[in-house]
Image: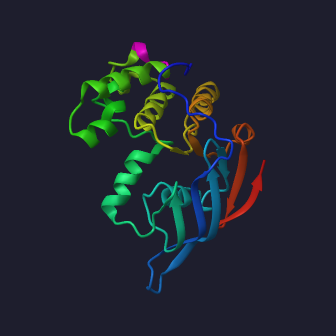
Amino acid sequence: MISNGLKPLKPEPHPHPVVQLRQVRKSFNVGLPTEVEILHGIDLSLLAGEFVAVMGPSGSGKSSLLNLVGLLDRPTQGLLQIKDLETTTLNDHDLTALRGRSIGFVFQFHHLIGAFSALENEMLPMVGMHGFATAEIAQRAGDLIERVGLQAWRDMPVTQLSGGQQQRVAVARALIMQPLLLLADEPTGNLDTQSADAVFELFRQVNREHGTAVLFVTHNPLLAERCDRTIEVIDGQVAQALG
């Protein structure tokens, strides 16, 4: 259970957008005969504290959309704003800094380092920013690993953990920078039903207790029904908004 740790954000009477996309397009091989556009004029807003499911068939553009929102890629056209900052004019250094302090990522394949313990994997984003593990980082990591239910496994190599436990480590790693936005790309896709439910509830608790906005890509309609609303991406366009 996530019941202690970081102080919850105070609820805002008028939630503000954490993410705004306006007529965002993404093409590859621009200017070449093989140029292809995969996202076609996306308009999307995500408010502070919202938990939004993203659904759509394979190849529809869901992951490409998430890569743009996560500042891992740049739009070909359009505007993309994170909080109050327009990102399309930022240089690579400023994009990296904004991504590091504002956005957490959890993927279907958790990309943990097998030789490292659960706690060491969790601390990597902060160690990467500071260059070494400070006492404050160690304290925050210890508190967070307990909050995700892995205190007894904190010093074990992640290769000795179950799939559900490894995904919890990945969630803790995404949260250690206290991001405004959490992006999840099929985070339960490789888990059994019980583990998938536990990981989803972990996302939900973080969202409710700290006001973290969440974009949750999933093929599971039962999980999508438990989100605040659902957007459907088909053929590179937002085709439907539910909820």
Say how the picture is coloured: rainbow
Residue at (21%, 39%) from the top-left corner? 131
**In this orientation, which residue lies closer to the viewer: 84 or 106?**
84
Establish if 57 lies above or below 185.
Answer: below
Residue at (62%, 28%) from the top-left corner? 201
Establish if 232 lies above or below 1.
Answer: below
Left or right relative to 210: residue 31: left
Visible residue check, residue 236: no
**In this orientation, which residue lies closer to the viewer: 3 or 238?**
3
Residue 101: where, in percent of width, then height?
39, 46
Kindly indicate the quadrant of the structure image that contains residue 116.
top left
Residue 139: where, in percent of width, then height?
33, 22
Residue 6: where, in percent of width, then height?
47, 26
Left or right relative to 10: residue 114: left
Establish if 125 lies above or below 66.
Answer: above
Kindly indicate the quadrant of the structure image that contains residue 141.
top left
Left or right relative to 82: residue 72: left
Residue at (67%, 51%) from the top-left corner? 55
Q: Is residue 28 magenta?
A: no
**In this orientation, which residue lies closer to the viewer: 199 or 42?**
42
Segment tinted magenta in the rendering: 148-152
Residue 238: where, in percent of width, then height?
69, 63
Q: Quadrant of the N terminus?
A: top right
Visible residue check, residue 133: yes
**Most prominent secondary structure in the magenta stretch?**
loop
Taking the view exactly as shown, the residue that stands out farthest to the right is: 243
Residue at (32%, 18%) from the top-left corner? 155
Taking the view exactly as shown, the residue that stands out farthest to the front is: 13
Taking the view exactly as shown, the residue that stands out farthest to the left is: 132
Left or right relative to 46: residue 63: left
